[in-house]
Amino acid sequence: MRMPASRRIAPWVLLAVVVLSRLPTMALLPLTDTTEARYGAIARLMAVTGDWITPWFAPGVPFWGKPPLAFWVQALSFLTLGGNELALRLPSWLACLLILALVARYARSLSGRDSAPVAALIAASSGLLFVCAGAVLTDPFLALGTTTSLVAAGLVLRGEGRPWGALFFLGLVVALLAKGPLALVLVGTPLFVWALWSGGWWQLWHRLPWWRGGLVTLLLTLPWYLAAEHKTPGFLHYFIVGEHFQRFLDAGWSGDRYGTAHDQPRGTIWLLTLYAAFPWSLWALVLLPARLRDAEGRARLRAALRDNDNRLLIPAAFVPTLFFTFSGNILATYVLPGLPFMALLLTRALGGRGRASRWVPGLALTVPVLSLVAGAYVLANPGTLRTEKALLACYQRQPAALRAPLVYLDEVPFSARYYGREAPRVWTPEQARQALRSAPGRPLYLAVRPRERAAFERGLSVPLFALAKDRRYLLLTNVPVGAEGCR
């Protein structure tokens, strides 16, 4: 029996609510340290310098950690919409919107029209995808590329036409320019497992235009890699050997030029997967044992494993987690490429939209509601965020700011670099003391950690006045007249 039109529309409305609920925090919250503000600063530098080949970690310091696709679109958005937070975050949101469209299209092919909004809704409201959709990151673009390729391959293998074959290679181009050769592992491994599991080697070879598509992929990606190496020699060795092998094999890799390694116990990625797919991961953990308790459920599970489509969905969903099981240098975002296919698997396990209608709405709204509550709390308590936006705004309002530098002791946070347009300087404490002693009347603004203030001021004859305080720093100045505090 056909479902009434009003009930068919309802999941799409709920999906729109989930997707649009990400926009308020994207627009209102400042860029936070470290990752988001770092990528925001790199995109801003690309926009203002007009250098579209080499992303710059700082003026004069090339960023070899990632290819440029994410920075290209973020810089274009910066130039088009201005330097506000929404402009930098919007490209990730749009990338995730395209991922949801692909998930819906694949679900429609697999299980019928009514399953399309359910699959997209599950993906959209998964914790990690929801967070990444509103953050300045490179991972949504990798996930867009891998999802495009694997969905296109799945549809081609289902006999849905040659245009999807071309889209398969376009997805590879996106992924290679967003993250690098890792894309070949995340796309190639599920297809290899599918062919091995199903015996579909002939279909895989003959239904995708490997020679033409491979040539176009090289023509669209290789020029940037060669141009980047030519412009800043050493890029290819660092990026290919360092980022793809040493980072994976050595959890304490000391060669990282842009931060520190993330040394986690092997297998931690599985716990991060539970977080990434929340709240659906918890429901799946309840659903699977329930299926195994009775003979009918076990029979349905065996049938699902024999299903040719599931033989692609399962590796597509879990290859990212399996791959990083053997690495300790991991982040939760590494799971993101698998989430669209976890959503498709769960949708199929639920039997489509009808069986899911009781629980899906409440679960789908869990993460968006938590996000809005957390956003409201942060807006009411801005000091809880790791960001220098308010401190920079206070400094920029001071009468002497145009002729007095803002100096951070020991290091400048990325958010200070972004909101200060690379103007804040970094000095050692001794350099700052020497400046105050040698020219006590010269205006100076200092960002000092509160716990270090007493040690810094010891022995100084020049009094310092506190103007502002955030989570990490005090803004001090030696300007005795007209120094106005900031709330």
Image: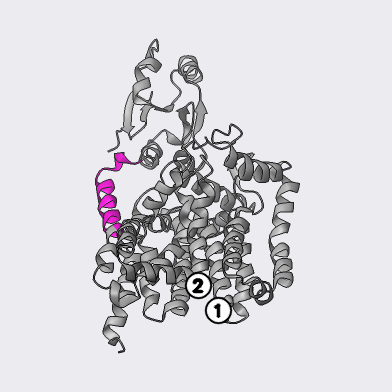
Q: Which residue extends farthest front? A: 295
Q: Position of residue 60 (x, y in %)?
A: 64, 39
Q: Would residue 44 be counted in the magenta stretch?
A: no
Q: Position of residue 109 (x, y in %)?
A: 47, 79
Secondary-structure class at tag 1: loop
Residue 309 circle label: 2
| Contact between labelled residues 1 and 2, with CB atoms less than 8 Å apart | yes
Q: For label 1, count other residues whose C-alpha is less than 10 Å away and answer few (under 14), some (14-19) or many (20+).
A: some
Q: Would residue 373 be counted in the magenta stretch?
A: yes
- Residue under the point 38% across and 58% down: 130
Secondary-structure class at tag 2: loop
Vertical side of 257 occupied by 199: above or below: below
Residue 276 relative to residue 80: left or right: left
The residue stretch that appears in magenta: 367-385
- Residue under the point 76% across and 47% down: 230
**Which residue corresponds to mark 1?**
158
Q: Closest to the observer: 484 or 154?
A: 154
Which amino acid type corresponds to the residue marked 2 in the rendered image? Asp
The quadrant the N terminus occupies is bottom left
- Residue under the point 43% across and 35% down: 401
Secondary structure, magenta segment, majority class:
helix
Vertical side of 109 occupied by 336: above or below: above
